[in-house]
Amino acid sequence: MNIIGFPRIGQKRELKKALESFWAKKSDKEELLKVAKELRELHWSYQKDLANVVVNDFSLYDNMLDLSCMLGVIPKRFSNLSGLELYFAMARGNGDSLACEMTKWFNTNYHYVVPELDYECDYKVDATKIISEYREAKSLGYNPKISLIGLFTYISLSKVSDDSGIKADFLPKLKAAYIELVKELASLDSHVFIEFHEPIFVKGESEFNSHILDFYNDLVDLGIKAVVTTYFEESRESTKILLESNIDGLGLDFIYGEKNLDSKILGDFAKYGKKLYAGLIDGRNIWIANLEDKLSILEKISMIVPKDLIHINTTCSLLHVPFGKDDEVKMDSEILSWISFAREKIDEVKLLESIFRHGQNDENKAAFEKNKNINAIRKNSLKIHDQNVQKRVKDMQDNERKNAFKDRIKIQKDSLKYPLLATTTIGSFPQTPELRVLRQKYKKDEIDTLAYENGIKDYIKECIAFQEEIGLDVLVHGEPERNDMVEYFGEQMKGFVFSQNGWVQSYGSRCVKPPIIYGDVSRPAPMTVKWSSYAQSLSSKIVKGMLTGPVTILNWSFVRDDMERKEVCKQLSLCIADEISDLQNAGIRIIQVDEAAFKEGYPLREENIKTYESWALQCFKISSAVADDSTQIHTHMCYSEFNDIIKTIEAMDADVISIETARSGNELLKIFKKVGYANEVGPGVYDIHSPRIPSTDEMYAQIKLLLEVLPKEQLWINPDCGLKTRKWEEVKPSLKNMVEAVRRVREEM
């Protein structure tokens, strides 16, 4: 029995606080590494009853970034740096050196730092991190298992710095460096156990499949115990190859990859004597496991695969779920009993293993009966079902705007009168310590509603005044009342519940606390009209209404697993449609419906994509169909490779879409030109995930490049994303420089 990885941020976000203190120069390297060591030791203590504790799942920022440093894949612009300065510069930028690109880890909300492959790279291997952590675990009496991102996942998720290069060119050098890395690890012990993470294999055939067999045989020849694990969906193509290799075993996901139950594939485990690490405890969602169902799956598997070859596993790393339930004292106790975070999932792995191996006995019977009882109560609870919501979804019909974009945009430009290269922001402004204290005091009833609302109004006034002062064209209210772009809406809808400390790492020190959708969803009252109306009353310029779209709310929440996701999303769509209707009736003329996580929900296997696109697109359009022709609908998308979904973006029919392009140049934008995209576009002209302040000249040059791709009539100018996580001393000069860059370009026109 094993887990694939454990959350590293800490139960109370200790790592986040240590990182931010170090970055702010309030603490030194030794203090940061001390916190990291304490966290590793604590996390291993929870795994002590498992077959192994996981080593190298811990990271100060990101595991892909760690592997880049181990293999010596260092971009030339950082060649003068070393140690933690180099490491964090690659993640966050340094002076005039842009940070490495960051994007989503498959279809999760976790972000990884994208490796940059360069022909001149030296590939100097450094295994120090893993060796140190392995010895730490051994010194504490644990049996370590090294977690290592696989070569094929690493190269597939990399980018080539030279536009003319192809990834396959780098395979020989990367393979040699990777083997050298594993060779160093092999010397740590006899038969060092290394689990190679290859989630890329669930995407099916690739240019690298022909290399899998020889490569993993070469690794086994180094004298290690090698297990390859895949997750997030099924991986039959690579499974067939790997079962013929010399590896010790293979991990498969049996929750999100049901086709892994194919009897022919399972039969090969028995044929080749390979261990099956059966992913049955969900590493991506927070619902208590139905152990009866898991045992039923195990019985089917064990009819084909000998029982002694089967090992119980989580489906993926527990990085994607919160730490534990110990601090959850405010949640409804019945709903809390339905929930399982990382620490509880370790207990589920142990209990499932015990019953599978030994049947019900004095040690496990009570826990098993408790699990059965909780699942039965949840299934029949009246808290879950709302007949009115279900009827409304069943009866809904129209999901199209009244007229085509070409007709709407004429009306909008005539009434809204925004200039060429209109400037705006994505929505949020810095969440200051004072704002957080204000919200905390209000939640704790330390201040009354009047004091809270006056504090929010003061912040909105400052935001509006600043934007008018620097000359932005379309303003935002800054979202001071919002703790999180999804949580804020979930708190105002029925069917949601919230944890107190259910933090999940998104990237680096950035953590989110996903809402939990446990039942049918509805919107009892307007959610944003009050603050949008107030902000608009302060300015003669247009102030955008800011909403989070239904698909993003779904993809950034822990979603009930007793109903299809598309049906939950339809319920959310009707809530957002009601909000758009109320906003436009209140005089809000531009409404942004952010779908930052639209791409994130895409299935990984191509054959499943059309089904997702169909219902996700339908849900966005259900939300926006209520908008009048004169109401301009914006949307925003993050970290997306748009080449394969551009037609779906067109079909969304938003009047304006803003996208992140600063770290990737104009590559994302070129696809819009290629397909003849007609609607308006706001490509980000500076990266908000880095603390650096871009100059006017830099953004001027970026805008000129944009104009080489799309006409000025089609372009908006904005930052890459919301400014919530930045500081005012970074935001103010950056936006001033952006507006000045646009002014210079307009003068040249």
Image (tube, rainbow, N blue to C red):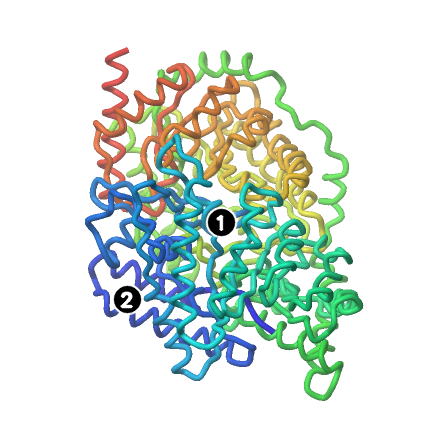
Question: Percent from the top left, x then y, of residue 222?
Answer: 47, 66
**Relative depth, front residue between 594 and 169:** 169
* In this picture, residue 166 sits left or right of residue 403: left
**Relative depth, front residue between 494 and 164:** 164
Nearest-to-viewer mark from 2 and 1: 1
Question: Percent from the top left, x then y, of residue 4?
Answer: 54, 65
Q: The N terminus lies in which quarter of the figure?
A: bottom right
Three-letter code, disc 2: Leu
Instruction: Name the residue that disc number 1 marks.
Output: 105
Three-letter code, disc 1: Trp
Give me the C-alpha separation between circle 2 and circle 1: 25 Å
**Relative depth, front residue between 313 and 453:** 313
Q: Residue at x 61, y 40 (%)?
A: 575
Give SS at disc 2.
helix
Question: Percent from the top left, x then y, of residue 748?
Answer: 24, 12
* In this picture, residue 392 sits left or right of residue 157: right
Whether the residues at callouts 2 and 1 have beta carbons within 8 Å, the answer is no
Task: Determine which quarter of the picture holds residue 659.
Answer: top left
Give SS at disc 1.
loop
Instruction: Name the residue that disc number 2 marks.
Output: 32
Mark 2 or 1, nearer chain start:
2
**Relative depth, front residue between 75 and 543:** 75
Q: Determine crowd level at label 1: few under 14, some 14-19, many 20+ residues with C-alpha closer than 10 A.
A: some
* In this picture, residue 27 sits left or right of residue 338: left
Question: Percent from the top left, x then y, of residue 120?
Answer: 30, 42
Instruction: Give the mark count.
Output: 2
Q: Determine crowd level at label 2: few under 14, some 14-19, many 20+ residues with C-alpha closer than 10 A.
A: many
Task: Determine which quarter of the picture holds residue 536.
Answer: top left
**Image height of 633 relative to 549, above or below:** above
**Image height of 448 relative to 404, above or below:** below
Instruction: Work out whether residue 316 can be spotted.
Output: yes
